[in-house]
Image (tube, rainbow, N blue to C red):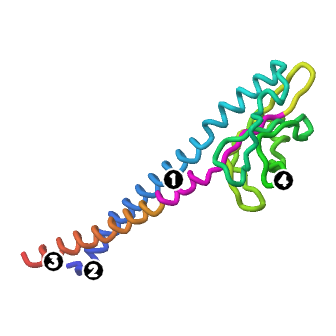
Amino acid sequence: MPTISNRFISIAFPVIVAGTVILLTAYVAVQQDIRQSSNDPQIAMAEDAAAALSAGSVPASVVSRDIIDASQSLSPFVMVFDDHGLALESSARMGDALPKPPAGIFQYVAMNGEDRVTWQTPSGLRFAAVVTQWKAASSTGFVLVARSIRESELRVSRLGWLMFAGWAVMVVGTMVVVGFSQMVGKRE
């Protein structure tokens, strides 16, 4: 006859493993949805700017004259580069300097047309960035649109704590229910 601890483990362990897998899957799915949706405004802005530039608009016409401090603001910003990666226009600064795009991004976009990345600056700031290529009759280049993911990362952090709390309740609850059923079963 199995001991209480063996029966307890044989019942509780599969329930805890299954619950853990379900909660981890839910966490990853929601985390990815939050992160990917952080790109939505930038996708539209980058595609619209690239279309306008490809149609012959000048870079200054697709970049706001309102300069933001990208190290502080949650607003999206637009940067236009020539085909060598030199900045032509930017609606953002980081302190006194232009934000420096991720290394190799323009080479990748030149080969693939677009890239969507999490861009982390040397100071640790993180941005959801969309880079696309534009091609006009007389020039080509790249449009980079980005915005801080600070709020998205806070949401993911809160989600992680909620999932952990749910997991802890599930583990303790499973152990209590299985332990209680073992005690009741032993009395009968």
* Circle 4: residue type: Asp
Along the polypeptide, which appears first: circle 1 or circle 2?
A: 2
* Circle 2: residue type: Ser
Q: Secondary structure at mark 2?
A: helix
Where residue 106 sits: x, y (%)? 83, 41
Question: Circle 2 sits on which residue?
Answer: 5
**CA separation, marks 2 and 4?**
66 Å
The residue positioned farthest toward the front in the image shown: 66
Where residue 174 sits: x, y (%)? 28, 68
Q: Residue at x 60, y 37 (%)?
A: 40
**CA separation, marks 2 and 3?**
11 Å
Along the polypeptide, which appears first: circle 4 or circle 1?
A: 1
Q: Secondary structure at mark 4?
A: loop
Q: Nearer the viewer, mark 1 or mark 2?
A: 1
**CA separation, marks 4 and 3?**
70 Å
Q: Is residue 29 magenta?
A: no
**CA separation, marks 1 and 2?**
33 Å
* Circle 3: residue type: Met
Q: Nearer the viewer, mark 1 or mark 3?
A: 1
Q: Residues within 10 Å of mark 3 (few under 14, many from 20)?
A: few
Contact (Cβ within 8 Å) of mark 1 with mark 3: no
Q: How many marks?
A: 4
Lateral position of residue 67 relative to residue 76, left or right:
right
Q: Which residues are magenta?
A: 142-159
Question: Circle 4 sits on which residue?
Answer: 96
Question: Circle 3 sits on which residue?
Answer: 183
Question: Circle 1 sits on which residue?
Answer: 28
Q: Nearer the viewer, mark 4 or mark 3?
A: 4
Q: Nearer the viewer, residue 120 or 63?
A: 63
**CA separation, marks 1 and 3?**
37 Å
